[in-house]
Image (cartoon, rainbow, N blue to C red):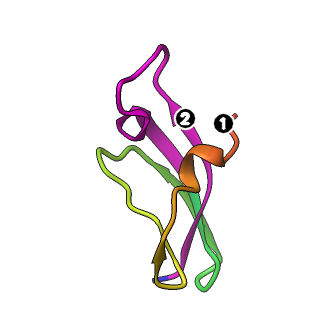
């Protein structure tokens, strides 16, 4: 499944663990040409087989 997350929405305020602060994300499935948005409790990113910390660098959802 080739899903690319395009933006995130984080909770307000400070968090001990910023990775649990992501409330909502927008994504695109480039293979099926569909987009969507979802709320998730846990999201793990893997780019070309390597675990990365790129989610918090994405722009905030509009």
Numbered circle sitting on residue 43: none
Q: How many marks?
A: 2
Q: Position of residue 45 (x, y in %)?
A: 46, 65
Residue hosting label 1: 60
Region rendered in magenta: 2-26
Snapshot quadrant of residue 4: bottom right
For the N terminus, the quadrant is bottom left
Q: Residue furthest top?
A: 13
Q: CA distance from mark 1 to mark 2?
A: 5 Å
Q: Secondary structure at mark 2?
A: strand
Residue displayed at 65% across by 38% down:
61
Name above or below for residue 50 compared with residue 8.
Answer: below
For the C terminus, the quadrant is top right
Q: Are marks 1 and 2 in contact (CB under 8 Å)?
A: yes
Q: Residue furthest left?
A: 41
Q: Position of residue 38 (x, y in %)?
A: 43, 49
Q: Magenta stretch containing residue 25, yes or no?
A: yes
Residue displayed at 55% across by 52% down:
55
Residue hosting label 2: 9
The residue closer to the viewer here, 14 or 33, is: 14
Q: Position of residue 29 (x, y in %)?
A: 58, 74
Say which label, 1 or 2, has the lower sequence index: 2
């Amino acid at each position: 499944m080739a899903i690319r997350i395009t933006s995130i929405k984080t909770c307000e305020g400070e968090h001990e663990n910023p990775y649990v602060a992501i409330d909502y994300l927008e994504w695109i499935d480039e293979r099926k040409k569909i987009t969507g948005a979802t709320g998730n409790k846990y999201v793990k990113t893997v780019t070309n087989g390597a675990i990365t910390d790129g989610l918090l660098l994405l722009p905030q959802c509009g």
